[in-house]
Amino acid sequence: MSESSIKIIGQVADFASFPAQVKVGSEPYFIVEAPRSGDEPQRYNLISAICPHAGGMVRPHKNELICPLHYWCFDLATGESTNIPGEQLECSPLEIVDGQFALKA
Ligand code: FES
């Protein structure tokens, strides 16, 4: 039997722009605008701010998240590395439930 739970990340109205830094538990993340096509409504992803290489803290720069330790770069919308093939930041889609960003576990 499987159970699903929802973790509330925060009120959508509290975030004026993206990427937005948030903590989930004690872990740092960014809420980012997810890729979309045509007239799809805007969707959002929750991307870890911890670099998968050696644990550096990535920072937004233009359309990427960049790790200052060894300069691995990641797409700002998906977390996929743009310079290290096959690597990526942990990334999960967010849902909006009753005006709140929600993460399904
Ligand atoms: S720890 Fe991020 S590139 Fe090395």
Image: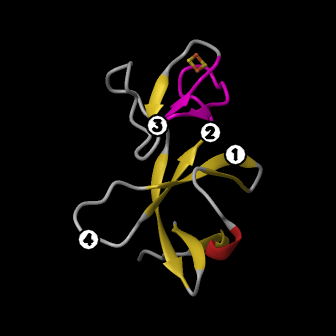
Q: Nearer the viewer, mark 3 or mark 2?
A: 3
Nearest to the observer: residue 79 or residue 86: 79
**Residue under the point 62% across and 73% down:** 12
Q: CA distance from mark 1 to mark 4?
A: 31 Å
User: Residue furthest toward the bottom?
Assistant: 98
Q: Earlier in the sequence, mark 1 or mark 3?
A: 1
Mark 2 surroundings within 10 Å by alpha-carbon count, few (fewer than 14), some (14 through 19), many (20 or more):
many
Nearest to the observer: residue 15 or residue 50: 15
Q: Which residue is mark 2?
A: 49
Helix, strand or loop under label 3: loop
Number of numbered discs present? Answer: 4
Q: Which residue is mark 1?
A: 28
Q: CA distance from mark 1 to mark 3?
A: 19 Å
Q: Locate residue 67, reporting x and y percent.
A: 59, 23
Q: Would you say the beta carbon of the disc 4 residue lies within 8 angstroms of ligand 1? A: no
Q: CA distance from mark 4 to mark 2?
A: 29 Å
Helix, strand or loop under label 1: strand
Q: Earlier in the sequence, mark 2 or mark 1?
A: 1
Q: Locate residue 36, reporting x and y percent.
A: 30, 59
Residue type, mark 3 in image: Asn
Residue type, mark 1 in image: Pro
**Residue under the point 34% across and 54% down:** 35
Q: Earlier in the sequence, mark 4 or mark 3?
A: 4
Q: Which residue is mark 3?
A: 63
Q: Which residue is mark 4?
A: 39
Helix, strand or loop under label 4: loop
**Residue under the point 66% across and 24% down:** 56
